[in-house]
Image (spheres, grey):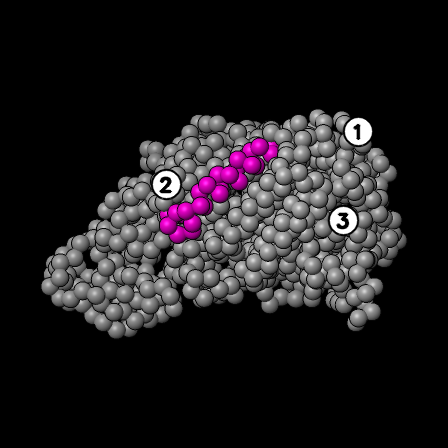
Amino acid sequence: MTKEYKTISKIAGPLIFVEKTEPVGYNELVNINLPDGTTKRGQVLDTSDDIVVVQVFEGTGGLNKECGVRFTGETIKLPVSKDMLGRILSGSGEPLDGGPRIVPEDRLEITGAAINPYARLPPKDFIQTGISTIDGMNTLVRGQKLPIFSGSGLPHNEIALQIARQARVRGSNEPFAVVFAAMGITNEEAQYFMRDFERTGALERAVVFLNLADDPAVERLITPRLALTAAEYLAYEHDMHVLVILTDITNYCEALRQMGAAREEVPGRRGYPGYMYTDLASLYERAGVVKGRKGSVTQFSILSMPGDDITHPIPDLSGYITEGQIVISRELHRKGIYPPVNVLPSLSRLMNSGIGATRTREDHKAVSDQCYAAYAEGKDLRGLVAIVGKDALSERDKKFLEFADMFEDRFVRQGIDENRDIETTLDIGWELLAELPEAQLTRIDNKYIQKYHPAHRAKAEQKE
Amino acid sequence: MKNKGEIYRISGPVVIISGLNTKMYDVVKVGKEGLMGEVIGIEGDKSTVQVYEETSGVRPGEPVENTGMSLSVELGPGLLESIYDGIQRPLPVLKEKMGDFIKRGVSASGLSREKEWDFVPTVKKGDKLNGGDIIGTVQETQNIEHRILVPPTISGTISTIKKGKFKVDEVICTLEDGKELTMMQKWPVRKPRPVSKKMTPTTPLITGQRILDGLFPVAKGGTAAIPGPFGSGKTVTQQQLAKWSDTEIVVYIGCGERGNEMADVLYEFPEIKDPKTGRPLMERTVLIANTSNMPVAAREASVYTGITIAEYYRDMGYDVSLMADSTSRWAEAMREISSRLEEMPGEEGYPAYLAARLSEFYERAGKVKALSGKEGSITVIGAVSPPGGDFSEPITQNTLRIVKVFWALDAKLAQRRHFPSINWLNSYSLYTKALGPWYDEHVSPDWVKLRNDAMELLQKESELQEIVQLVGSDALPEDQQLTLEVARMIREYFLQQNAYHEVDTFCPMDKQFKLLKSIMSWGDKAQTALEGGAAIEDIMKLKSKDDLAKVKYEKEFDTALGVILNTMEDEFAKLKR
Ligand SMILES: Nc1ncnc2c1ncn2[C@@H]1O[C@H](COP(=O)(O)OP(=O)(O)O)[C@@H](O)[C@H]1O
Ligand SMILES: [Mg+2]
């Protein structure tokens, strides 16, 4: 048993300061024994001969200077096992479902070492989500980190669940799993996810970590790390393809800010710590495919943009790290369009390696580029029409204006259970593009126009 | 004080040690595992060290040892085709030693000690050598001859020189004073390698990217910055430059960015052929990958590691280009370390020495006469990642004060998939004048005027657009409608370039010239036709205009363009009648 210290000299926010210790390791796990017999856990943030700073995960409520502090001599580890599948755990990894403790097959460091870039395999397996704005315009691939940038009151949960239900790598039935980590969301929201997992039987293949709105904020700093550790274990030791849903990244960042303030650090932009980029990278970069290993970790996290502002540090730093973003639009939502994905600011950086002749269809890139260009132009014209009226537009411009409306109505809009395959998605794209003058399709190679454009397609098919 | 001290305090990558005699930038071995670190501050008997590896579990009281050396890189044959972390540890070696994930406490030397290289001397016994002189060559890759240099600080007369197969640390030459030379030398990364003199850059770096070569060229030996919000094309542009630029050596630094992007380069570059030599691109490339989740202190060092390697090839007489993606992450690493030191923060929390560090870095670019007498150059192209895409922030602003070329990325263009999304109104190059004579000689005497005319049209377009926003385009006089149309052609047919299209990804100078000339001459003809009484509607419907849109994708560009130019002649001739 390690030595117990009763030398807390200061308690400030989620931090305690302990004096006169033997040498304590950086990042070490700490147990704090309260007078009422309960134990809280913490982690060493700063250590020296004189003073040790500990952040307490369950919050410092109820602590006083009489508490006993034990340094465990090891960093935080998560007991892992394949039996985690189907289990619901707390934000710090304790069973919440009344089931037994996990009998560990291994205990893994939750900080997770960086994947050696040389060991990575560039992700390229197309995941069909059945949602046109994603598959057609911002394609997701296995091993990608692609968050949803949303806002309060928008249907990001519905979209995340639709993806969790429908996502498939076509022609493969390799084992897959979902790791779901809630960080500071409401109980009601969490229940919404749980019910859907139960209804669809997904729960059996899921590991759930719950840190809810009324759980301590500091715990949120470890919840995603537990989830990612479990995901990596299932992916790299049990060959599973794991989809990780972290929600809500914004709550995580708020906890980070709170911790920085408690440590009296010099704050960065809008009060968030200067190291938030590096900290977020230590989460997001834990997605990928590793050479010679069968499984993979794909991240599809939810982030609500404070004030719908994409330049806010949380979405901004995230966008700099993730491999794209799916942006949910309040304007489309108000128009009653589901899923209200605004494709213009959305992006999948790995799309190009996941699409094309052998993966989706040869015309995919061209159709997507052309739809982007045409929709952007049509949307601009809406602004102009508001000033000068529709009559001042040229015939050409009118076509683009109509395209934008049709695009939202037929391509973007779809049912919450509507699962479109990629061919359907691309064909809808073509139907809409066919409404534009053919000479305006400057992004598309003539050979694809001959083969897929509705005006030529019948002929092309007859020939074959 | 002595050569051994102990750890006093640990806070993330910053460790304070006591009782150790140190100099600034000494490399120290920290703790029981001997983690590598560098002294970045000294106060009383305490030294502050930034540690290049993860520090979890390290305790106060553990021993620290001073190597007495500054942070250095190993320079010699074997750099090309390598991929290193920020402190020149080869990633394949790390993978071999510790598996797929980067653990710590493993050292690995930058150059292989096993591999033998065929050394051919170019000097003989009795020759007098000065620092930087070439003493022989090694065929490093099929097209790159590695010139073995005397370290800049050494000179003397040769007493023996060998020929044959050697490892990098075997002696190949001895001097009369007993000094021994090997094919490898070490150089401290924070110290620029000396040159004989700096020269003015007069040759453009040809990148095969139309908007860069055409409108905003950078000179070989020049500096450029490419700032932009996320998703606007910094990385793709940098990679395009690494792929297609006509330099002899490329140093590509992935500084605090994505792991998958580096994996991509690693998979792609061995497959892509250098358009000039036909050899795999990897054979001329050195990669440095210190991704966002790798230790932040090593990220800070990565930029120096890269530029030192670049200088070494420059000293052999090569044209080198260096891409740093992203310099903002480097600056943030400085900020992170600085705030742990509790230094007085400057603007937005960055250390007060930020501007100095940036300009010292870009100052290491340039065209030079090396100590050996050969001419070489380093072109530095830095990506900048401004928070919220706001160019008024300190890194962008400090960088723009230094560099000569500004490629301003624009999120609006990226959103409509106009790539490269470089804004043609805000960007600039201060080299265009100096490079003029080169274009006259190597492209065409018409080139400079053609480009200026195109720029002028684009400028005009933006003025007209403001009117269109108020009254709609149909209300404009016909000649202005035509101006808008030709400007649109320049933007869509010439400036837009798809990095993922097998043909369009690289566009030689000659093709750039012909394409732009054809568009502009279509515009001239249209103007003449309009003045001759042709209807604007008829002009707009000409097939030759639509054909010009896609000619850049043609494998047989010259033939295809020839056909279009003929159509164009015919169509305009008919219009006249
Ligand atoms: N020249 C280009 N051609 C085609 N697509 C491009 C080009 N430049 C950028 N893109 C697209 O934009 C995306 C984002 O570009 P990237 O360079 O990764 O942005 P950044 O580094 O600024 O975040 C890429 O994934 C790619 O789809
Ligand atoms: Mg980038």
The residue shown at (39%, 39%) is B433
Observer-nearest of A125 and B316: B316
Residue A14 rendering spot, x and y as whole percentages: 63, 33
Answer whether labels 2 and 1 touch (C-beta < 8 Å). no
Residue B436 rendering spot, x and y as whole percentages: 39, 43
| Residue of label 2 | B434
Q: Chain of mark 1?
A: A
Q: Which residues are magenta?
A: B438-462
Secondary structure, magenta segment, majority class: helix
Q: Does residue B529 sit above or below B72 in this rendering?
A: above
Q: Disc 2 versus disc 1: distance between alpha carbons?
A: 49 Å
Q: Quadrant of residue A3?
A: top right
Q: Look at the numbered disc 1 and give the secondary structure of its residue.
A: loop
Task: Same chain for labels 2 and 1? Say yes or no.
Answer: no
Q: Look at the numbered disc 2 and give the secondary structure of its residue.
A: helix
Packing grade of label 1 (10 A; few <14, some 14-19, many >=20) is few
Packing grade of label 3 (10 A; few <14, some 14-19, many >=20) is few
Packing grade of label 2 (10 A; few <14, some 14-19, many >=20) is some
Q: Amino acid at mark 2?
A: Ala
Answer whether labels 3 and 1 touch (C-beta < 8 Å). no
Answer whether residue A419 is visible to the viewer in this image.
yes
| Residue of label 1 | A389
The residue shown at (84%, 47%) is A410
| Residue of label 3 | A437
Q: Chain of mark 2?
A: B
Q: Disc 2 versus disc 3: distance between alpha carbons?
A: 45 Å
Observer-nearest of A362 and B169: A362
